[in-house]
Image: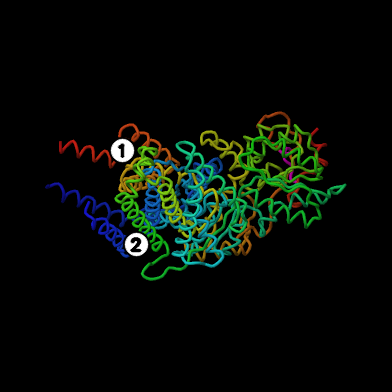
Amino acid sequence: MKKGLPLLIAVGVLLAALVATRLVGNRYLYFAGYVIFQYVVLATAWNILGGYTGYVNFGTAGFFALGAYTATVLILAFKAPLPVQIVAGGLVSAVLGLGIGYLTLRLRGVFFSIATLALALVLQTFVMNWEYVGGAKGVSIIRPAAFPPFASYVEFLFFVMAALAVVSAMAAWWIENSWVGRGLAAIRDNEEAAECMGVPTLRLKLLATVVSGCFMGVAGAPFPYYVTLVEPVSAFSLDYAVNSLAMPMIGGTTTWIGPIVGAILLSTAQQVATVTISSELNLLIVGIVLVAFVLLAPQGIVGLVQRLAGRRRA
Amino acid sequence: MRKRPTFVAVVSAVIIALIGTGVAVPAEPIKLGFGMALTGALAGNGKAALLSMQMWAEDVNKKGGLLGRRVELVYYDDQTKPATIPAIYTKLLDVDKVDLIVSGYGTNVIAPLIPLAMERNLTVVGLFGMANNEKFNYGRYFQIMPVGPNPPVDWSRGFFEVASKQSPKPATIAIVGADAEYPHNAMAGARKNAEQYGLKVVYDNKYPPSTVDFTPIVRAIKATNPDVVYVASYPPDTAGMIFAAHEVGLAPKMFGGGMVGLQFAALQTKLGAKLNGVVNYETWVPEPTLSFPGINDFLKRYQAQAAKAGVDPLGYYIAPFAYAYAQVLGLAVEGTKSLDQKKIADYLHGREMDTIVGKVKFGPNGEWAKPRMLHVQFQNIEGNDLEQFKRPGKRVVLYPEEWKSGTLIYPYAKARK
């Protein structure tokens, strides 16, 4: 891919999001669009560690909630603006990623996954007993007033999440096409061999957990203003862990575009299901699609397309 | 192609004829929009609430609708997830163009709805949310749950009021509950009431929501020898606590308070005679003092459909109130002859309304102006037969005085026999 193309796509997506807020009067689309972009960020973040490096993280909800609760604390204590919340949410989650990386990256396979799952549970228990942020009952947040050029604060949230999706995708693209990505791929294929070849495996894995955790926290930071109620059950919902894992699997884990394709397809299907079939079929949809892809197209949609294109060329 | 002019002419003639003869073209229905827990943790009650609302819409439409327009319910499954609420209600308002909204079931799905209603100056009636308006103080929010103006404290006030009137008067209390949203609220209120009624707290602990063995907890409570045990629990814990209390032989003077689940047939039939003596909160029970106009007919129709709908076969706790919260909104629309949100809110604030759950009057913060959370004692339960719970005398009302239908058997051990 030409070097300037991702930048052009990124600018194009941002401009499209901005124009959409000027042209689309239906606020529902902003709410639905926000969720789709949120999953683009989460799936991309998950893929940096899970897809490129091969370390399956079940603790997405923990990092996401940490971003959400960091933002909540900043709102309650200082009424901090959203950009500050996002930066702080990302930093706190990145630090957690670093800490967890140090503690758990010596564990491999299922043990690492269990450790990340436990992290989310520990964090949830802590938050449930932290009265400042409402404890188990949660805390209500009031959105600030809208400001130009946005007609409502939700439009602004939609635009911000679109921007975050673009930034996360660009970060993933850079990782994939740099020495970092090649190092991570070497770790995924054979960690011992990579180590012997001089790849700084621990440093790279730590970098992956930091970047992955940071983007998960960033995705969670606008959550308080989106839902206006931050409570542990929602913030630590299993949906985030399941979706952020399933979306790259469906889209394809080896490229930066895979998680984006998976996130857009799956979260759009879920949004449509919520207001049509109207049930908890959301997770069922994820399950069925995931099983179908694992069986029929283990490399995801991107892998399938590449394979078909390869055949045609041959 | 030649047929088209003939078809157009016929249609035009029919329209002209209809206008000429004064036949009314049906008006657009009034759309009432809401999200409801049809899946997820609160789906059992959400489905029962939906059935009640459908019955209300049917009743209203049989009488000619509201303002001469048919009522149509537009609803989506909120999956008991607060995060779904902003999108669902925005779709209801912007895409489905509903005229009126009410909340789904439960505190956590009402909380994100209020800011949304505030942004658009909408009137919203809530279904069983605890102290949702405490922070917002939104003038167009109303809550059908009969807790009263100070929800966290009024929730358990009856329990302490009853305890304070006994002889010998209890002096100590154990407060226990799950480490989750509702128990936290209930326990905070119980602590305030304990202080107000002069009870010394000898045990105050939470347990993880995933707890399955309650014996150690009950043993720890027993070791402190409290006169009263206040329990704030979710259904599985409620059953666990009662079984453990019987196993360990916990016999305080009063036991119960804020146990969720005892309002429903499933736990009532499961626990059967083990319920004797337990004092707990309720919203409605089949006692003669609570025989409001229309409620028995409603319950008869509800119970006939309950099995098919897969909901609580008794329907005493949530179903009449789900009917009533739509009912008050309907009364306001008819009373103001308008769908204007301000006029509707003003109407709901200003007067006492007759509903199937009795007279409803909202206070300034949208909660019931006067608390009517019932505290009842299970008495004379025999075996696990469901039918007995439909008869009076099985859950006698102890509080409030105005609705009292029996006397507390005191202490708890005496009622357990």
Horizontal and vertical percent position of residue B186: 67, 51
Q: Are marks 1 and 2 on the same chain?
A: yes
Is residue B394 a member of the stretch shown in magenta?
yes
Residue situated in front as seen by the camera: A23 or B70: A23
Q: Chain of mark 2?
A: A
Circle nearer the viewer, 1 or 2:
1
Is B149 on the left-hand or right-hand side of B402? left
Q: Is residue B370 magenta?
A: no
Amino acid type assigned to the residue bearing label 1 in the image: Gln
Question: What residue is drawn where x is 32% and y is 63%?
Answer: A18
Location of residue A205 in the rendering, given as x and y in whole percent from the top left corner: 42, 47
Residue B277 vs A224, above or below: the answer is: above
The region drawn magenta spans B392-397
Left or right of residue B229, residue B64 in this image: left
Q: Please give the count of numbered marks on the rendered protein.
A: 2
Q: Secondary structure at mark 1?
A: loop
If you read the primary sequence from the N terminus, does the residue marked by circle 1 or circle 2 appear first? 2
- Name the residue at 69% across, 54% down: B188
Q: Residue tagged by mark 1?
A: A299
Task: Specify the subunit that label 1 lies on.
Answer: A
User: Looking at the image, is B167 positioned above or below residue A34?
Assistant: above
Q: CA distance from mark 1 to mark 2?
A: 39 Å
Above or below: residue B247 compared with residue B161: above
Residue sitting nearer the eye, A66 or A3: A3
Residue A25's disc is 2
**Amino acid type assigned to the residue bearing label 2 in the image:** Gly
**Residue A34 x %, y %:** 39, 55
Is residue B112 something one can see in this rendering? yes
Res B34 seen here: no
